[in-house]
């Protein structure tokens, strides 16, 4: 029967060309949508790798009158002591301004062995950064106070960068080369890895985990450091936030901004989710159009083919087999469209377009194929049922 | 191809004998078409026995119920009242699936307007009844080729129906009707759309099928000459049998 259907459709290829094109375009649109959805879902399934609840960030403009490295160190120590004296604050750490869920990004290219110019995010972190965010060490150790004044440049890298550069070997004790801006060539080639930290999803729930490395805040950078991460006790409220604001204003004397990481995550996620919702709505309208088009064409075909349906009933087809044949024809048409669509879709993983994992594309292809088959089946079922109800004597008489 | 004979035929001696086996039995058949406002009596209490191997023609003016009666015999339509038995099988109790299988095995149809599928080649059109049986593609091809050879169209197998003349189309329809080797052929004005020469050719093929293979044939026709060539003539008028 399949050969018969295929032959029937092949002989009507000109009439079916538009329908095939419509299904092909629907497949491509669904492939694009599902690629984004699968990409986001895979990222969403990844653990965050750190605790962002009850973590606040304090952003301030470093005072202009404190420029000397010793004065900066004394100022930072005084600020820390002031904050530590508050019982609601359990941990705190100075940080660069690319804290989790911020819009800031700082990155560089690093090299090791045959792996050249691998991009990695750069984070400036204090010695208690790990504790504030409850991050987990994979191997080695975290940054200490002494690392900031070490003659070697000390870094801690994340697990993803380790797997990208070291092919399954441990990164601890190895030295990386980089082209970090502002450093001379000699220093630039000496990034000593002292530890590997587990990956954290610091760009949002739906964003991919990226390679990263953590630098200690050395004396050169300390002057420009204007972010403190605070871990507060659960349930700490706005009253304390107000008190904190007043205390810091009096101590620092410049602009202060206090943010909560959980609220920053919501804002960050919106940047990803809102375009997806808009694209989903547009695709939804497209799919409704395609479904109505398919339904209309199949309905029209049945009315045009009443004589054929009557004949098939006369020569031995049951109502169900007529219905199945019409659904089958629609599915054969869908298969032709999908084969064409899959040919183009498979170019994405083969040519590594957009640098996404092959699995993401393949999952999107599978989902799109299933979606189109379900859509076509649903659109063909009712016209098929109507065809099954055609009375053969009436249909044959009409011709 | 079946040789076309022009000599007058001699009827089977057993036809209409008391011992003849009845192939189609219609008992007190009534057919009423109802709409919201009108009730039309299309068939009025017709009882008819058609013997195995008989070639029966049905005549009557347009709208007298000939095609309705043929559709009831072909199990394409249900009578409002009465019983239809084919080859001793009471068909009124068969469900859709069994009716379809019964039609497929026992009956072959020929229509005035051929009812060929224009998107399928001649060979595929002839194969159509076999698609609804458990037969392999090879068997289907072989049987369809043989059927086309019987009607003299083996050289047109790869053509589409639109490339054929009316007579050729009707021959394809006959090949389709006989491909499943049914015991009964129901022909609804098979020569109605053809000129007299073509009509005679088609009639000869039907007569050959009846005489050589013993196929029971019921033919609706408007043509007295064609009807005279059959074993028996039934005349209808206003839904009733008048002869």
Image (cartoon, coloured by chain):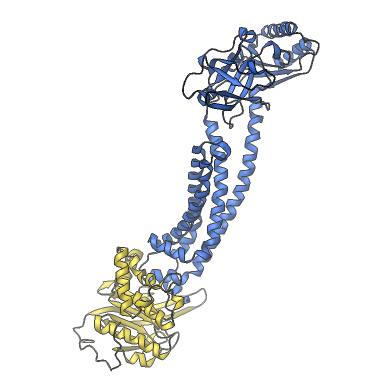
Q: Nearer the viewer, residue B202 or B189?
A: B202
Q: Nearer the viewer, residue B181 or A126?
A: A126
Q: Position of residue A311 (x, y in %)?
A: 41, 71
Q: Position of residue B172 (x, y in %)?
A: 38, 77
Would you identify the image quadrant in which residue A208 lies? top right
**Which image quarter is the N terminus of chain B in?**
bottom left
Q: Nearer the viewer, residue A126 or A86?
A: A126
Q: Position of residue A330 (x, y in %)?
A: 47, 58
Q: Position of residue A101 (x, y in %)?
A: 64, 26
Q: Nearer the viewer, residue A333 or A182?
A: A182
Q: Residue furthest front?
A: A186
Q: Is residue A218 above or below residue A265?
A: above
**Which image quarter is the C terminus of chain B in?**
bottom left
Residue at (46% x, 66% y) in the render: A11
Q: Is residue B124 above or below residue B191?
A: above
Q: Is residue A124 above or below residue B67?
A: above
The answer to whether residue A391 is seen in the rendering is no
Q: Colour of chain B?
A: yellow
Residue at (52% x, 29% y) in the render: A46
Say whether residue A327 is left or right of residue A290: left
Would you identify the image quadrant in which residue B180 lies? bottom left
Q: Colour of chain A?
A: blue
């Amino acid at each position: 029967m399949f050969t018969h259907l295929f032959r029937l459709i092949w002989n009507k290829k000109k009439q079916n060309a538009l329908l095939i094109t419509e299904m092909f375009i629907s497949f491509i649109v669904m492939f694009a949508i599902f690629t984004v959805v699968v990409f986001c879902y895979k990222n969403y399934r990844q653990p965050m790798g750190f605790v962002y609840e009850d973590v606040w960030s304090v952003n301030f403009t470093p005072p202009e009158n404190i420029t000397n490295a010793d004065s900066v160190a004394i100022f930072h120590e005084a600020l820390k002591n002031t904050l530590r004296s508050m019982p609601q604050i359990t941990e705190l750490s100075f940080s660069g301004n690319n804290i989790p869920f911020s819009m800031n990004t700082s990155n560089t290219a690093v090299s090791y062995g045959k792996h050249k110019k691998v991009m990695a995010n750069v984070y400036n972190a204090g010695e208690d950064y790990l504790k504030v965010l409850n991050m987990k060490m994979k191997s080695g150790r975290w940054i200490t106070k002494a690392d900031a004044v070490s003659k070697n440049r000390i870094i801690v890298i994340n697990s993803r960068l380790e797997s990208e550069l070291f092919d399954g070997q441990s990164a601890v004790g190895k030295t990386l080369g980089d082209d970090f801006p502002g450093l001379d060539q000699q220093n630039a080639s000496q990034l000593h890895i002292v530890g590997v930290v587990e990956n954290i999803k610091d760009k949002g729930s739906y964003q991919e985990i990226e390679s990263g490395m953590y630098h200690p805040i050395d004396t050169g950078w300390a002057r420009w450091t204007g972010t403190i991460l605070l871990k507060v006790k659960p349930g700490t409220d706005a009253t304390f936030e107000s008190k904190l604001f007043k205390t810091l204003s009096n101590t620092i004397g410049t602009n202060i901004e206090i943010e909560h990481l959980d609220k920053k995550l919501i804002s960050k996620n919106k940047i990803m989710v809102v375009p997806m919702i808009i694209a989903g709505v547009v695709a939804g309208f497209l799919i409704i159009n395609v479904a109505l088009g398919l339904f209309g064409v199949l309905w029209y075909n049945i009315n045009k083919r009443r004589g054929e349906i009557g004949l098939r009933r006369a020569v031995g087809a049951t109502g169900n087999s007529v219905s199945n044949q019409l659904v089958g024809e629609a599915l054969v048409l869908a298969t032709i469209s999908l084969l064409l669509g899959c040919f183009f879709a498979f170019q994405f993983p083969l040519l590594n377009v957009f640098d996404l994992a092959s699995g993401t594309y393949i999952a999107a292809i599978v989902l799109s194929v299933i979606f189109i088959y379900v859509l076509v089946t649903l659109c063909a079922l009712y016209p098929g049922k109507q065809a099954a109800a055609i009375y053969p004597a009436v249909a044959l008489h009409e011709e | 191809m079946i040789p076309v004979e022009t000599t007058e035929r001699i009827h089977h001696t057993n036809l209409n004998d008391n011992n003849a086996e009845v192939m189609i039995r219609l008992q007190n058949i009534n057919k009423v078409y109802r709409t919201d406002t009108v009730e039309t009596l299309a068939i009025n209490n017709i009882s008819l026995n058609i013997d195995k191997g008989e070639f029966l023609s049905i005549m009557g003016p347009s709208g007298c119920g000939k095609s309705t009666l043929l559709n009831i015999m072909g199990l394409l339509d249900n009578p409002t009242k009465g019983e239809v038995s084919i080859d001793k099988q009471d068909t009124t109790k068969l469900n859709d699936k069994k009716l379809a299988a019964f039609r497929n095995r026992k009956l072959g149809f020929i229509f005035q307007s051929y009812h060929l599928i224009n998107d399928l080649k001649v060979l595929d059109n002839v194969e159509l009844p076999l698609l609804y049986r458990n037969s392999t593609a090879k068997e289907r091809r072989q049987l369809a080729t043989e059927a086309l050879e019987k009607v003299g169209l083996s050289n047109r197998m790869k053509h589409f129906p639109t490339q054929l003349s009316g007579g050729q189309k009707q021959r394809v329809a006959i090949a389709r009707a006989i491909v499943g080797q049914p015991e009964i052929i129901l022909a609804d004005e098979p020569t109605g759309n053809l000129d007299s020469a073509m009509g005679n050719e088609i009639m000869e093929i039907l007569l050959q099928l009846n005489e050589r293979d013993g196929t029971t044939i019921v033919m609706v026709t408007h043509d007295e000459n064609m009807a005279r060539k059959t074993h028996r003539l039934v005349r209808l008028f206003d839904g009733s049998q008048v002869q």
